[in-house]
Image (tube, rainbow, N blue to C red):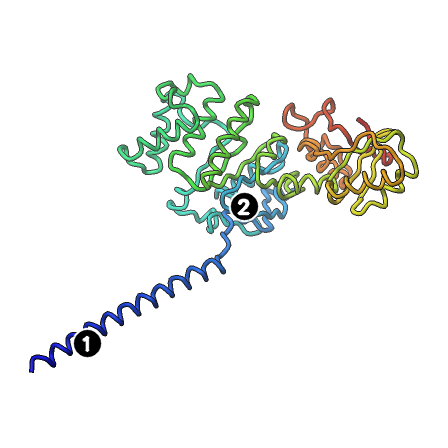
Amino acid sequence: MLLFPLIVLWKEKEIKEIIGSTMQIITSDKQNLAEATSQEIAPALEPVITVQKVCKQFDKSVPTIQEISFEVQPGEIFCLLGPSGSGKSTVMRMLTGVYQPNQGYIRVLGIEPHNFTRKTRARIGYMPQNFVLFPELSTIDNINFVASAYGMSWFGRAAKVREALEFVNLWDARDRLASQLSGGMRRRLDLAGVLVHRPELIFVDEPTAGIDPVLRAKFWDHFKALRAEGRTLFVTTQYVTEADHCDKVAILSRGHLLALGSPEAVRRQAMGGAIINLKLDEVTAQALRLLRSIPGMKDILTVSPEQLRLIVEDSGQALKAIVNVFQQNNLDIQNIEPYRPDFEEVFVTLLEKDTGKLGLATSELAPPATGLLPTENKRPPAQKQKSGQTWTE
């Protein structure tokens, strides 16, 4: 009589073990399938900033911002480049909720800026163009004040305050009054105040204006370090050469975008393609005929009786093709090399194309400013003249 209940209990235990192991296999298979599926159809990251056909007009005159569109992806440095009065600060103020657009669509962290909640604002840092902290407070007291404004507790923020000051190399000057700091140190103090609450999106309005080139380079080292941490930076600047530090560049003039893309893409857009400099013993009709036969040749510009500037689709392929065809026809090449214009030349070329459409002088659009935009005494090495296909050095 006792044997039957024991057999039942033993069978019940065996069945439970079988069911348990089966469920583990099913669960494991589901997890593997879910992981494989998520890898196959992983959703793309949403842009941190989306701007679509945005206009801003303050009165009945010409709109300050005219139908601009761009996106800023997570973890990139986006540079809005333009001369004074181009509309950079207006764009920044729309993105931070100070202004609302008259037309168009703006989303920052998925929200319209004028609807930012306190929680959303805690995810954002903003560094204005001018020093806005307190000269009568010490360096560390200023950062403690900013931390308290973000609701960080006194005991919980000490490590973050130190981290922010060390990041900008101001920890050793923590007890010095802000009024005793140099202009460059004040800019770094501003940056520490932006970083103390560890924002994921950082707006920086002309951070290097008025500081020396060495310190400007240090600022960009800081920005690249922040990008390496996964932060997203939106930077405005007048310094043309700073565009090469960025992942994406938007060039703004008179409220509309002249170019948008990576620095290399903007170069190609401005110059019409890649560039090759070619020097011969003499530019002959035969040489020009051979060059025109090269695949991907877009334009041939004369620099001097011996030198040409070639606009091509792909500089690497074109360079090899030119060398081969000249060797086959027993023509000597003195020198041939790819040419990468600096961003000052790119910037001026885009402005001249834009002003040429309107019949304006470049000076009307972008008044010269030393170190910011090219002046008449410092023009790019080669500029096409209106009289024809002639270049001057």
Q: In the image, what residue type sits under mark 1? A: Lys
The residue sitting at the top extreme is 180
Mark 2: few/some/many CA within 10 Å (<14, 14-19, 20+): many
Q: Which mark is residue 11?
A: 1
Q: Secondary structure at mark 2?
A: strand
State which quarter of the image contains the N terminus.
Answer: bottom left
Asked if residue 366 lies left or right of residue 13, the reply is right
Image check: 312 left or right of 41?
right
Q: Residue at x 49, y 60 (%)?
A: 40
Left or right, residue 12 beside residue 104: left
Picture quadrant where residue 387 is located? top right
| Rendering quarter of residue 135 | top left
What's the amino acid at mark 2? Val
Between residue 9 and residue 169, name the one nearer to us. Answer: 9
Q: Could you tell which of marks 1 and 2 lies nearer the N-terminus?
A: 1
Residue that numbered label 2 is attached to: 72
Q: Residue at x 12, y 76 (%)?
A: 6
In percent of width and height, residue 3 lies at: 10, 80
Image position of 289 (left or right of 256): right
Answer with the quarter of the image where residue 212 lies: top right
Q: In this view of the protein, which residue sits in the foreground, 135 or 201?
A: 201
Q: CA distance from mark 1 to mark 2?
A: 63 Å
